Image: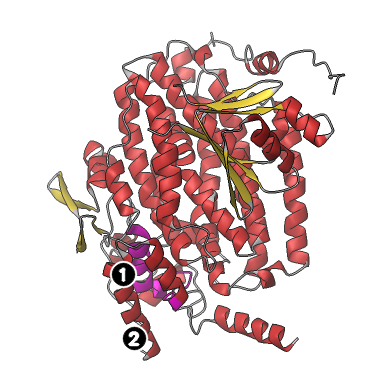
């Protein structure tokens, strides 16, 4: 049974550093590009780290800024000050 | 980033400070009188504090992010209108998907606002109250932004002028309308299971994600922007849907069979309603991103599979009839389009036979079914239309007592036989389109015998008159403009003129 968690973000300037950070922190993730959006799938869990996004963005980044770019997701959410994680209970 | 800003409180504490401790137990009146609806459904809650909101969005952050979304969205809508963005879409046929969206889906956003306002009042726990309140505001924003975005198309194209009026009256719009009426007349926990879980978590991706990507592919900047702006709230709504399920299941094991029954019911009702979206994706997008079948595989089979595997630890099974719904993914868009092709003289949007390259695309995407069952029929209809005999069906169809879709869907193992079921209640016979709808009827017949079925209402003389044109006027249709075949429509004429102009320039 597939246990893929997934996040879909807009394909725009705000989301690009987030997408890049996800790729960096989740080497297993698969990035699917569709018109207007990017869907990233990963087996079991996927993390977005504030530190990585801030490095790429060159400014402070509030994890909740994710709300501006997110389109959809699948998985249980764990949101903290410095990360956002999706997972299924294995 | 060595110097990190210091927040006084962490996100979890801030969220808890701003959502907990604000409620109180009433003393002048009994709590059960103040909250009369949150226990009659049989859901047992021992500890409302067990509610965990996964997105810890406080009200101040909510307003900050929402206003930023609105600013971005309205900049795009304004620029789209100012720069005649409608000239950049791939083809005027595409606008018919927007007509269905504005009349069928946008009024649901308003229904959702009303529903969440209601249940947000009626939970005695503050966690779900806050979540429902935010969602009610979101839903109001969605209906407003959708009307604002699509009002630009209303300046040029037919069928977009009376969405709320049509939503309350037109036969095919009773499908989505009755879905929400059904949910809003249920108790608060069933409402959240139906809308937040079954619709938003399990099924809404199929509408808002690949369809909006399709809008982007077809040059409709306004729709993509409102769609994805709405969807950014939707991601939060999805977590509410999953949370309410986990909350109910963790509170008491006696909740499990109730939740399972609601999941079965609302999954089936949702898939029925999505037949409209299936047809929008396979037939109404001139440039296509993915087929309905592919979208089903990604968003139900894969994403839903992972979700239900996660819920299995509570004793929850995948929805009943999920196997039938998956079989339907091979057929449903073609059958739904055929129903509308039959009745497009009574619809506020146009239909057509897809062009050859589009038929080829469908053949490729549906190797098991399209050439065998659907392509020959479309080619026949095309030939008839070209010979001046465009087919319209002049009889009124029988509707399913539950989903209200005309009973034109087939048995999935025998796609040449119409599927229908019969139930008896108080000496009357009631017909449903499928086992899924029959189960729903049989569990609550007293509810569904009250359904306002458009065809019955027309025959009873409640819809403007005895003849089809009388009914269509009662719907507020502009006859000869809003309805009928796309070829020869005023929309097509205008579009062709614009294209001729472009060539000349």
User: Which residue is pictured at 65% across the width and 82% down the height?
Assistant: B499
Q: Residue B384 carries which label?
A: 2
Quadrant (top left, top right, bottom left, bottom right) of the N terminus of chain B: top right
Residue B140 vs residue B322, the one in the foreground: B322
Q: Residue furthest left?
A: B427
Distance Cα–Cα, label 2 vs label 1? 19 Å
Residue B75 vs residue B186, the one in the foreground: B75
Numbered marks: total = 2
A60 sits to left or right of A71: right
User: Which residue is pictured at 45% across the width and 56% down the height?
Assistant: B277
Is disc 1 placed on a helix, strand or loop?
helix
Above/below status of B161 relative to B106: below
Above/below status of A60 relative to B171: above
Q: Residue furthest front?
A: A27
Q: Nearer the viewer, mark 2 or mark 1?
A: 1
B73 sits to left or right of B355: right
User: Which residue is pictured at 34% across the width and 75% down the height?
Assistant: B378
Q: Mark 2 lies on which chain?
A: B
Where residue B149 sits: x, y (%)? 66, 58
Q: Mark 1 lies on which chain?
A: B
Quadrant (top left, top right, bottom left, bottom right) of the C terminus of chain B: bottom right
B438 sits to left or right of B121: left
Q: Is residue B327 visible?
A: yes
Q: What scheme was used to colour the molecule?
A: secondary structure
The residue that mark 1 highlights is: B371
Residue B212 included in the magenta stretch of the image: no
Where residue B211 sits: x, y (%)? 53, 55
Is disc 2 placed on a helix, strand or loop?
helix
Q: Which residue lies furthest to the top in this view?
A: B27
- Looking at the rendering, the stretch of residues picked out in magenta corresponds to B331-356
Residue B110 vs residue B82, the one in the foreground: B82
Q: Do labels 2 and 1 share a chain?
A: yes
């Amino acid at each position: 049974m597939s246990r893929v968690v997934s996040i879909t973000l807009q394909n725009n300037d705000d989301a690009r550093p987030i997408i890049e950070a996800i790729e960096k922190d989740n080497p297993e993730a698969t990035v699917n590009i569709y018109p207007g959006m990017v869907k990233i799938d990963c087996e079991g869990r996927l993390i977005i780290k504030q530190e990585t996004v801030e490095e790429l963005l060159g400014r402070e980044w509030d994890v909740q800024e994710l709300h501006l770019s997110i389109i959809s997701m699948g998985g249980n959410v764990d949101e903290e000050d410095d990360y956002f994680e999706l997972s299924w209970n294995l | 980033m060595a110097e990190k800003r210091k927040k006084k409180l962490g996100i979890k504490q801030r969220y808890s400070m701003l959502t907990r401790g604000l409620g109180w137990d009433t003393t002048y009146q009994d709590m059960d009188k103040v909250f009369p609806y949150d226990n009659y459904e049989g859901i047992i809650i021992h500890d409302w504090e067990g509610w965990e909101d996964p997105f810890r969005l406080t009200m101040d952050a909510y307003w900050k992010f929402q206003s930023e979304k609105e600013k971005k969205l309205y900049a795009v809508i304004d620029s789209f209108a100012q720069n005649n963005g409608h000239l950049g879409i791939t083809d005027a046929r595409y606008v018919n998907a927007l007509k269905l969206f504005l009349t069928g889906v946008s009024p649901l956003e308003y229904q959702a606002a009303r529903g969440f306002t209601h249940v947000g009042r009626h939970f005695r726990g503050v966690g779900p109250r806050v979540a429902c309140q935010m969602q009610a505001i979101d839903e109001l924003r969605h209906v407003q932004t959708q009307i604002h975005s699509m009002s630009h198309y209303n300046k040029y194209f037919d069928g977009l002028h009376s969405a709320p009026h049509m939503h309350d009256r037109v036969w095919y719009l009773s499908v989505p309308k009755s879905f929400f009426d059904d949910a809003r007349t249920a108790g608060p926990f069933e409402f959240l299971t139906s809308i937040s879980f079954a619709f938003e978590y399990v099924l809404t991706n199929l509408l808002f994600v690949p369809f909006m990507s399709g809008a982007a592919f077809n040059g409709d900047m306004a729709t993509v922007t409102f769609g994805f702006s709405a969807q950014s709230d939707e991601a939060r709504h999805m977590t509410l849907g999953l949370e309410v399920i986990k909350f109910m299941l963790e509170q008491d094991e006696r909740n499990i069979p109730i939740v399972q029954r609601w999941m079965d019911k609302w999954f089936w009702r949702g898939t029925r309603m999505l037949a409209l979206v299936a047809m929008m994706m396979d037939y109404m997008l001139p440039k296509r991103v993915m087929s309905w079948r592919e979208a089903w595989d990604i968003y139900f089979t894969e994403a839903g599979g992972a979700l239900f595997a996660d819920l299995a630890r509570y004793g929850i099974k995948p929805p009943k009839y999920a196997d039938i719904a998956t079989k339907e993914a091979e057929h449903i868009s073609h059958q739904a389009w055929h129903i509308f092709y039959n009745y497009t003289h009574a619809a506020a949007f146009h239909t057509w036979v897809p062009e050859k390259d589009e038929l080829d695309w469908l053949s490729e995407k549906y190797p098991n079914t399209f050439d065998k069952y659907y392509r020959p029929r479309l080619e026949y209809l095309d030939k008839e239309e070209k010979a001046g005999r465009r087919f319209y069906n002049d009889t009124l169809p029988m509707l399913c007592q539950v989903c209200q879709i005309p009973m034109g869907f087939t048995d999935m193992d025998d796609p040449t036989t119409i599927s229908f079921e019969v139930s008896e209640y108080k000496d009357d016979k009631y017909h449903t389109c499928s086992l899924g709808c029959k189960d729903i009827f049989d569990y609550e017949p007293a509810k569904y015998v009250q359904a306002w079925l458009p065809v019955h209402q027309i025959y009873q003389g409640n819809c403007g008159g005895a003849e089809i044109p009388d009914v269509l006027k009662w719907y507020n249709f502009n006859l000869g403009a809003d309805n009928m075949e796309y070829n020869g429509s005023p929309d097509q004429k205008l579009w062709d003129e614009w294209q001729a102009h472009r060539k000349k320039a």
